[in-house]
Amino acid sequence: MKVPIASPVMTEKMVEAAANALRNERLTLGESVFKFEEAFAKMCGVKYAISVASGTAALQLAILAAGVKAGDRVITSSMSFIASANSYVGFGGLPGFADVSESDYNLDPEKVRAAIDGKTKAILPVHLYGYPARMDEINEVARSKNLVVIEDAAQAHGAMYRGKYAGNLAHAGCFSFYATKNMHVGGDGGMVTTNDDKIADLCTRMRHCGRAKGSNYIHDIIGTTSRLGTVNAAVGLEQLKMLPGWNEKRRAAAKVYDAKLKGVGDLVIPPLPTKDVEPVYHLYTLRTKKRYELKAHLEKKGVGVGLNYEVPIHMQPIYKQLFGYKEGMLPISEKMCKEVIAIPMFADITLEQQNYVIESVKEFYG
């Protein structure tokens, strides 16, 4: 049996929605874009959702709109995809990293506090693998230091923390619609969510070349071209309708893995849901000191795997070159990045597929 690591869904209804948008709407900023934004804002429980061309663009525009400038430091997790830092380093922002907690793989609020210096302007917690960070504590740290908080919710569509959805837990939230996420848009795409009028206004205008309100040819801020295509928005609108059901399927699949893989060999299963945290399992990750041996075994069995993330951001060659980071600076992140392995997780994974994955893992451990 072959079991992929992910399996993006594209139904005939989604294809037809895309075709209908092509036939009947403006190709950029068409009606489907605004409908998608309205529906996504409603899902997150926020006033505004601003669609953009990618998750990285969502992070960059939200950070800029929140007032971060070149020379300002943003503290984030190094145990993440590189976009979490590239998004602001690209315009001259300074990277700042705090270590994660081994209990939930997310930023440790007290280590964030210790990492703050005079140049720090913002905190960017990452809801890693769809498990929300400890936002109340992070927000309290930010309030005590007068800092902005931007959620990297690229993996957390529909995740909940203390009764509120990801994307509604800070000054702004940023989502990715890359193909392997819990929902996609048939291509690259992203979304900024916020209750802040100024952030919403700036993101809306910056994505559209910095145009002044009501004008096509007057530009009163520096912007970029980062609009979500109308066709992509039409696909996203259909995907969003299915997201709650898909997330429930992921949670059910995670329970199967939890029950059958706990206690196998040296495996550590993911952090479990709590009364405060309802994750959405963008990835289902295991930890093992035998990661590469397990990876080789599973791939021979036809089981897709991922190493998320094999090299922490601060140990990436370009970050070592530019900023002089060295091994040992973030010991927990570095340790966990050497141990994490993702196994197949997608909404329509069958029990037969899961049992094959589980049997293959157990076979490795004898």
Image (tube, rainbow, N blue to C red):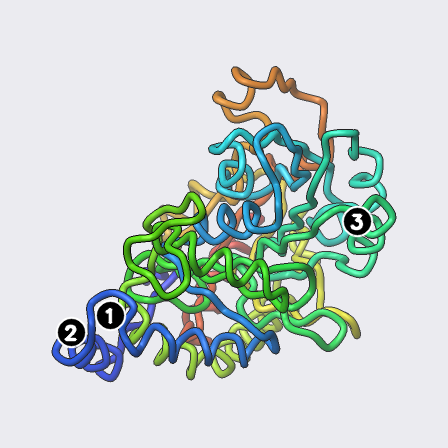
Asked if one can make out residue 293 in the rendered structure from this viewpoint, the answer is: no
Q: Give the spatial CA distance, label 2 vs label 1.
A: 6 Å
Please determine whether, in this image, residue 243 is positioned above or below residue 182: below
- Contact (CB < 8 A) between labels 1 and 3? no
Q: Residue at x 61, y 70 (%)?
A: 159
- Give the mark nearest the N terminus, 2 or 1: 2
Q: Position of residue 118 (x, y in %)?
A: 78, 29
- Contact (CB < 8 A) between labels 2 and 3? no
Residue identifier under label 3:
142
Q: Give the spatial CA distance, label 1 vs label 3.
A: 38 Å
- Give the mark nearest the N terminus, 1 or 3: 3
- Contact (CB < 8 A) between labels 2 and 1? yes
Task: Tell whether 300 sits left or right of 68.
Answer: left
Q: Residue at x 61, y 29 (%)?
A: 94
Q: Quadrant of residue 166?
A: bottom right
Q: Quadrant of residue 173?
A: bottom right
Please determine whether, in this image, residue 330 is positioned above or below residue 2: above
Q: Residue at x 54, y 79 (%)?
A: 43
Q: Position of residue 82 (x, y in %)?
A: 50, 38
Q: Position of residue 37 (x, y in %)?
A: 44, 73
Label 2 neighbour load within 10 Å: few <14, some 14-19, many 20+: some
Residue identifier under label 2:
22
Residue identifier under label 1:
231
Label 1 neighbour load within 10 Å: few <14, some 14-19, many 20+: many
